[in-house]
Image (spheres, rainbow, N blue to C red):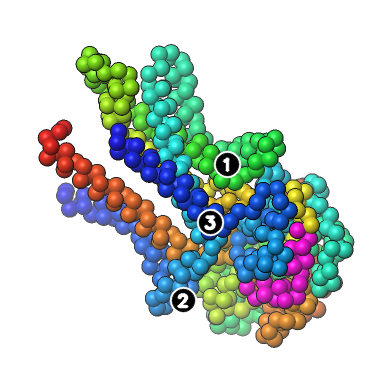
Amino acid sequence: MKQLIQLIGISLIVGALLILSTKLIDPPPAKGKKDVIYVYNWGEYIDPALTKKFEKETGIKVVYETFDSNEAMMAKIKNGGTPYDVAVPSEYTIQKMAKEDLLIPIDHKKLSNLKNIDKDFMNLPFDPGNKYSIPYFWGTVGILYNPEKTKGIDFNSWNSLWDKRLNKDVLVVDGAREGIGFSLNSMNESLNETNPKKLEKAQNKLIKLSPNVRGVVGDEINTMMVQNESDVAVVWSGMAADIMSENDNLDFVVPKEGSNLWFDNMVIPKTAQNVEGAHKFINFILDEKNGKQNTEWVGYATPNKESYKLLDKETREDERFYPDSNIRKKLEVYKDLGKENIAKYNEAFLKFKMSLK
Amino acid sequence: MKITGKLYLSIVLAFLYLPIFFLIYYSFNGAGNMTHFEGFTFDHYLSVFQNKRLIVIIVNTIAVALLAASISTLIGICGAIGIHYLRNKKIKVGLLTLNNILMVSSDVVIGSSFLLLFTVIGHYTGMGLGFWSVLISHIAFCVPIVVLLVLPKLYDMNTSMIDAARDLGANSWQTLTKVVIPHILPGAIGGFFMALTYSLDDFTVSFFVTGSGFSVLSVEVYSMARKGITMEINAISTLLFLLVMILILGYYFIKRGQQKRSLKRGEN
């Protein structure tokens, strides 16, 4: 009896003390006051020094939380619960959220730094006029490869993936839009193609790739490529940058036929309680110096042309992550094709996966 | 036979502990990745201690685990005794079934239903997700475990002991604290530790009910996955592993000390 009371008593006291101690380490914002904003972002997707700087400059406390997928984030915002003021979804999710009336229109007049954003990245089909979202980072889909081991193959074209020499050597990210997408790209078709005949063609072409495919994988690509388990992978540019920072032998290219252009944009959810603070935060991120600092920390491509100018020359001229205007013209943003068409994409990709041996 | 038995045990243990040691080993890796070892360093530990947000999250995780485990042990013991002494068979079976359903139902269901519940509560009271929602839901999924671990102890208790205590003049409270609870103690303590580990490693339920700046480690680690797991995670895992190890060893030694003392005194 004594033992049980001790065990429970001590853990209750220690637990309570620990909770109180966190309040000392990181004092919580006073309730109901307008001097706090809740930011919901991907893990490791902002320089922590920047949130501190923002707190110092404006006196608004930043409560920062992270998520790992667009779907999870949307589920939480839809339900309310936490009054997130700023969130950072990807483009197709923004379109969905706008459709479901989960977002508050952004007041462009309050964003004095909006002029810093490159015009190329504004007014895109998923959010015409940037009514609901402001670009945060962007990237592409391309081929990550080991030049030493794949000598003689020119990865400047998607068709190079079908090269016979790459037997069982290609990793593909597990995404229907990405998989069917590069197959469509290799035939110079649009990534938002909905014509069933063309989709079938893309599917059949992808099935022909199966002898070359080592695996259709998710986050494991990171480790597999770092450890040289495979020589070629179709990945997002941000992922490629991460892998390359750990394995110098690799190179990345966005094929000349074009590719997907993806975005993570800042939005203000309907649940926001400090819309004023949210605008201040977005404007703060858009500042050229802050943008530069964040870009250097995160390592993805910035849509902020003033920040871009401040980056060191080596990064700026890296065409793998900041493709030149010729390729940029061919990049396409995914549109929300509607449930029916997405199902077709999934079906086609599934057939490809089943064809793997 | 003895050798094969030992061999089997060591293979099982190696299988269980190798990944952990692998992870600990790389937490000292200077190269900052898991591919090759490149010199010994404490850098990852330093960066954990310098990251205020991460520290708060670690402390949160431990605090919630301790609170949830202790409160659910209390509730669980009461529940188990209550169920055991119920006269009405139908209600008894019904309660047990309800308890078991909670044990086997998937975390996603529990998590999302808690999210809905707390959102509704939040609408009326203005209390959103945060510390309380996490604590309450952790208690909720820990209680069935404690009940399930305590019940068998109650079943195999000799009922004549209670009669004897009654005959010797013990009142209900004395019977409970001097006879029943000492008997179910191993089950209760087992339940406490099970609840502790359940709460520490729960991701699914926590994901749904964290909010308003209150987060736990599993949710945080999971959302780091997009940018690749950093070595900080290795360092945190190592620290947690050591902490749990110390706790369990401490408990073991305290218990052994008590047994020795009671043997000397001629009890038992």
Question: Is tag 2's residue or tag 1's residue first in the polypeptide sequence?
Answer: 2
Number of on-image labels: 3
Task: Write the residue at 70% across / 62% down.
Answer: A59
Task: Write the residue at 24% across / 19% down.
Answer: B165
- Would residue B140 be visible to someone looking at this image? yes
Which residue corresponds to mark 3?
Answer: A24
Quadrant, the N terminus of chain A: top left
Chain under callout 2: B
Image spot of residue A58 (x, y percent): 72, 65
Q: Mark 2 against mark 1, which lies toward the viewer?
A: 1
Instruction: Point out the stretch of residues depicted in magenta.
Output: A277-297
Q: Indicate the secondary structure of the residue bearing disc 3.
A: helix
Determine crowd level at label 1: few under 14, some 14-19, many 20+ residues with C-alpha closer than 10 A. many
Q: Give the spatial CA distance, label 2 vs label 1.
A: 40 Å
Left or right: A326 as drawn, with respect to A319: right
The amino acid type found where label 3 is placed reads Leu
The amino acid type found where label 2 is placed reads Ala
Left or right: A271 as drawn, with respect to A215: right
Image spot of residue A3 (x, y percent): 30, 38
Determine crowd level at label 2: few under 14, some 14-19, many 20+ residues with C-alpha closer than 10 A. some
Chain under callout 3: A
Which residue corresponds to mark 1?
Answer: B133
Q: Reply yes or no: does residue B251 show up in magenta.
A: no
Tag 1–tag 3 contact (CB < 8 Å): no
Which residue corresponds to mark 2?
Answer: B31
Quadrant, the C terminus of chain A: bottom right
Chain under callout 1: B
Check the image and report above or below for A199 versus B66: below
Task: Write the residue at 53% across / 59% down.
Answer: A25
